[in-house]
Amino acid sequence: MPELPEVETIRLQLTQLIPGVTIKDIKILKEKSFSGDKKLLFGATITDLLRLGKMLVIKTDKKLALAVHLKMTGQLIFKSQKTSEDLPNKFTRVIISFTDGSKLYFNDVRRFGWMKIIETIEDLKKKIGPDPLKVSNSQFYKILKQTKKPVKFLLMDQEKLAGVGNIYACESLFLGGVNPNVSANKLTQERSEKLLDSLKKVLNSGIKWGGASKQNFRNAYGEKGEMQEHFSVYGREGEKCLNNCGGKIMRIKMGGRSTFVCPVCQQ
Ligand SMILES: [Zn+2]
């Protein structure tokens, strides 16, 4: 699933491509993937893009915005030409055409993703926690103190902290030397600071490498990211720990999700 770095990668790229272009038409190929009256956006010019956790918000000059959640397998691919050889494909759910002939394709294999016309971002903001890249040490420590749940679940709880999913939760817990099963409220202030620092590092690394394309993720140009080549634990089951601690990376299940952990380094 695209997480904060993947969505941020798309946001950064689309910010170079679509502000200033005007929506001419929206073709909805799968009703479920789009909510709102599409005609309201015809003639609207894109002004800005922002990210709320794992959501992307495309703002326009019409006091309306288009919120996008990629969920499991969503892709948002921009093509400057009127026609493209490889798009639309059978997973294309929505096509946004701009007056200059360029197009934005929303593809989604699993169809859990969505596009929604919104008037304000406030309602979306209310449902999610702060952005981990902007959260302070004291704020993060307070969030940890609120729950006895395993710290990994807390990192992935969008209402507490918005943007982290399975991959970056595993990577940050490894870098922070924290066992994913430890109760969140048991972490000391010192360990909490180290964990937040690790989380920020792995998220920034994910952005630097253009996201992780272990599965379906593609950037706004339709290309793969490279973060998967820089994972420390994720998908490295049975391999030697990179810290040379002598341990081997194990895969455990937590809440039905594969969790990668070094039993020596993460206590
Ligand atoms: Zn280790």
Image (cartoon, grey):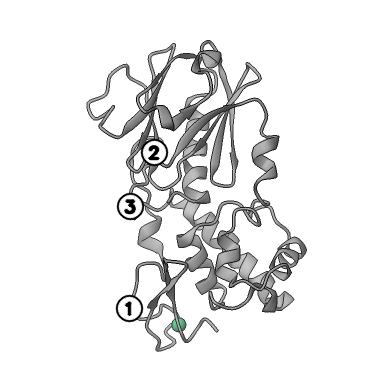
- State how many labels appear: 3
Expressed as whole percent of the image width and height from the top left, the position of residue 177 reads 55, 78
Expressed as whole percent of the image width and height from the top left, the position of residue 29 reads 35, 25
> What mark, if any, has residue 27 been given in the picture?
none
Query: Where does ligand 1 appear, by image quarter?
Result: bottom left
Q: Residue at x 31, y 79 (%)?
A: 238
Expressed as whole percent of the image width and height from the top left, the position of residue 151 reads 59, 71
- Residue carrying label 1: 239
Expressed as whole percent of the image width and height from the top left, the position of residue 122 reads 70, 36
Would residue 110 be found to the left or right of residue 40 on screen?
left
Amino acid carrying label 1: it is Glu
Would residue 218 be found to the left or right of residue 255 on screen?
left
- Secondary structure of the residue carrying tag 3 is loop
Label 1 environment density (alpha carbons within 10 Å; few <14, some 14–19, many ≥20): few
> What mark, if any, has residue 215 been given in the picture?
3
Amino acid carrying label 3: it is Gln
- Secondary structure of the residue carrying tag 2 is strand
Task: Say if 113 sits above or below 144 in the image.
Answer: above
Q: Earlier in the sequence, mark 1 or mark 3?
A: 3
- Secondary structure of the residue carrying tag 1 is loop
As measured in the structure, the alpha-carbon distance from the residue carrying label 2 to the one carrying label 3 is 11 Å
Task: Say if 140 sits above or below 84 in the image.
Answer: below
